[in-house]
């Protein structure tokens, strides 16, 4: 019986070689998977950052729009307050003009 016909070389060695090749192949696939997942995570982080920037810009725009509306409302209220302050004087003047007692 020659050395290559012994059970170790007929059974065990091909199994060991198969496991070694399979392990090497799986390691390369795991590395590829890790790299792929890393790229996806990086892309997701970039998208989240972009969404955050976009949301921040939208919030700033809304804040500016609300401030403009509040300024317009404040301006209108101040003109109404001015009219109310002057209202008593205008009523008194009108009553004096139209009062039958004065004639």
Image (cartoon, helix red, strand yellow):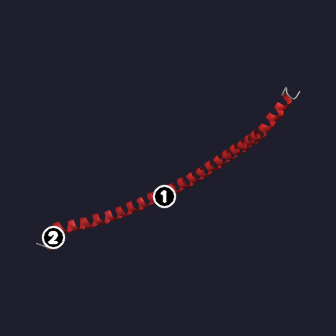
Q: Is residue 57 left or right of residue 47?
A: right
Q: Residue under label 2, please give it.
A: 8
Q: Is residue 74 left or right of residue 56?
A: right
Q: Position of residue 37 (x, y in %)?
A: 41, 59
How many residues crowd mark 1 within 10 Å: few (<14), some (14–19), many (20+)? few
Mark 2 in CB contact with mark 1 (< 8 angstroms): no
Q: Is residue 94 above or below residue 5?
A: above
Which residue is depicted at the point 47% across and 60% down? 42
Which residue is depicted at the point 37% across and 64% down? 31
Q: CA distance from mark 2 to mark 1?
A: 53 Å
Q: Position of residue 48 (x, y in %)?
A: 50, 55
Nearer to us in this view, 85 or 97: 97
Residue 38 lies in quadrant: bottom left
Q: Which mark is residue 45?
A: 1
Q: Is residue 48 left or right of residue 100?
A: left
Q: Position of residue 45 (x, y in %)?
A: 48, 58
Which element type, helix, strand or loop, lies under badge 1?
helix
How many residues crowd mark 2 within 10 Å: few (<14), some (14–19), many (20+)? few
Residue 56 lies in quadrant: bottom right
Which residue is depicted at the point 61% across and 48% down? 62
Nearer to us in this view, 78 or 86: 86
Which element type, helix, strand or loop, lies under badge 2?
helix
Q: Quadrant of the C terminus?
A: top right
Which residue is depicted at the point 67% across and 44% down? 69
Q: Which callout, 2 or 1, points at the residue further toward the start of the chain?
A: 2
Q: Quadrant of the N terminus?
A: bottom left
Nearer to us in this view, 42 or 81: 81
Q: Is residue 42 above or below residue 69?
A: below
Residue projecting furthest to the bottom: 3
Q: Is residue 56 above or below residue 26?
A: above
Q: Position of residue 33 (x, y in %)?
A: 38, 60
């Amino acid at each position: 019986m020659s050395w290559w016909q012994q059970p170790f070389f007929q059974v065990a060695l091909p199994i060991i070689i198969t496991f070694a090749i399979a392990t090497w192949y799986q390691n390369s696939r795991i590395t590829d998977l890790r790299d792929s997942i890393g790229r996806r995570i990086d892309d997701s982080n970039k998208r989240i950052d972009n969404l955050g920037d976009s949301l921040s810009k939208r919030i700033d725009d809304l804040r500016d729009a609300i401030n403009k509306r509040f300024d317009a409302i404040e301006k209108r209220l101040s003109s109404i307050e001015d009219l109310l302050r002057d209202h008593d004087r205008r009523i008194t003047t009108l009553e004096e003009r139209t009062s039958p007692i004065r004639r």
